[in-house]
Amino acid sequence: MWTFLHKLASPPHFYRLAAVLAPWLMVPALLLIAYGTVAGLFFAPSDYQQGDAFRIIYVHVPAAYLSLLAYIVMAIAAGIGLIWRMKLAHAVAAAAAPLGAWFTFLALATGSIWGRPMWGTWWEWGDPRLTSELVLLFLYIGYIALRGAIDDVSRADRASAVLALVGAINVPIIHFSVEWWASLHQGPTLIRAGGPAIELTMLYPLLAMIFGFSLLFGAMLLDRVRSEVLSRERRARWVRELLLPGGETA
Amino acid sequence: MSEVLSMGGYGAYVWTCYALSFTVVIVCFVQGRRRQRRIQDEIRTRLKVTVPGALTMTESSETNE
């Protein structure tokens, strides 16, 4: 087990393994998203309250879910990097941040567009779910900016890891915001006491989208961790052998 | 067909959300690939300059430490 982990954490090994693994995540991701999109847009019945506007759920919920998942991945990786001084973990944290920022932006944007016809407003300042998700976006942006501001990679790793860990307090706040405080935002549909409150023909496309987006996130994360590893290892012999003219390109 | 497009009157909202989602995912993916290519090019350029003195380069990082 330890030799396996040690080998996995070795940059050249990870670099090769990630390239092999990514397509195996990407292909099922695209299939699930294709199914979820078609079934969600055309085959799921209209919602009895929201009509067809509810179909926005199939892109909004996966985006919001990933905005949190990416943060959890980032914070755990940053923590591992801090405690065990593992460079690969810091690379994972650094790679997760821009993906998380994109999905947070998408969750906010689709939520806003959904809110306009349903709540009669694009945005409501002071709403706990909306505000905490916006704070999440700022955390990602702050994390990326902090990394960009520090030239020395290992110092950037440590400083940004502390920010990621402190900001993690926002994750449970976002998740429970709709239960703790009065919010315009509807309550949880899937992860709630008593099981999912949704029709099966509406549920399956949603699960497919969440799962598909997660796999897609995994594939894109692997891609970006490879870039991080390459950038950090630019002086290593294996990189030289990999990228020298005549050598194998990847 | 136009019924599908209109989405019970919510067409503009629904289609905008889906278009935006696919755009963001594609941008996300392309951004990652571009970064990979840029880093590879940078390293290659540097290697071409320094390869004559390659022996003095750090031998490092077969392991994580």
Image (cartoon, rainbow, N blue to C red):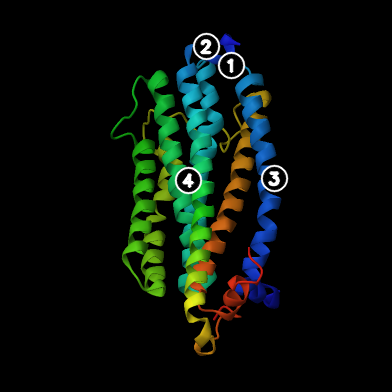
Subunit bearing disc 2: B
**Would you say the residues marked 2 and 1 are in contact, meaning their CB atoms lie under 8 Å apart?**
yes
The residue tagged with tag 3: helix, strand or loop?
A: helix
User: Residue A150 placed where, x, y %?
Assistant: 33, 68
**Would you say the residues marked 3 and 4 are in contact, meaning their CB atoms lie under 8 Å apart?**
no
Placement of the C terminus of chain A among the 4 image quadrants: bottom right
| Residue labelled with disc 2 | B8
- Same chain assignment for discs 4 and 2: no
Residue at 44% x, 25% y: name it: A114
Subunit bearing disc 4: A
- Same chain assignment for discs 3 and 2: no
| Residue labelled with disc 4 | A67
The residue tagged with tag 1: helix, strand or loop?
A: loop
Which numbered mark, 2 or 1, is in the foreground of this view?
2
**For the residues marked 2 and 1, what is the alpha-carbon distance in whole angstroms?**
9 Å
User: Which numbered tag is attached to residue A46?
Assistant: 1
**For the residues marked 4 and 2, what is the alpha-carbon distance in whole angstroms?**
29 Å
Kind of residue at disc 4: Ser
Q: Nearer the viewer, residue A84 or B43?
A: B43
- Same chain assignment for discs 3 and 1: yes
Kind of residue at disc 1: Ser
**For the residues marked 3 and 1, what is the alpha-carbon distance in whole angstroms?**
29 Å
| Residue labelled with disc 3 | A27
Taking the image as shown, residue A72 lies to the left or right of residue A210, namely left
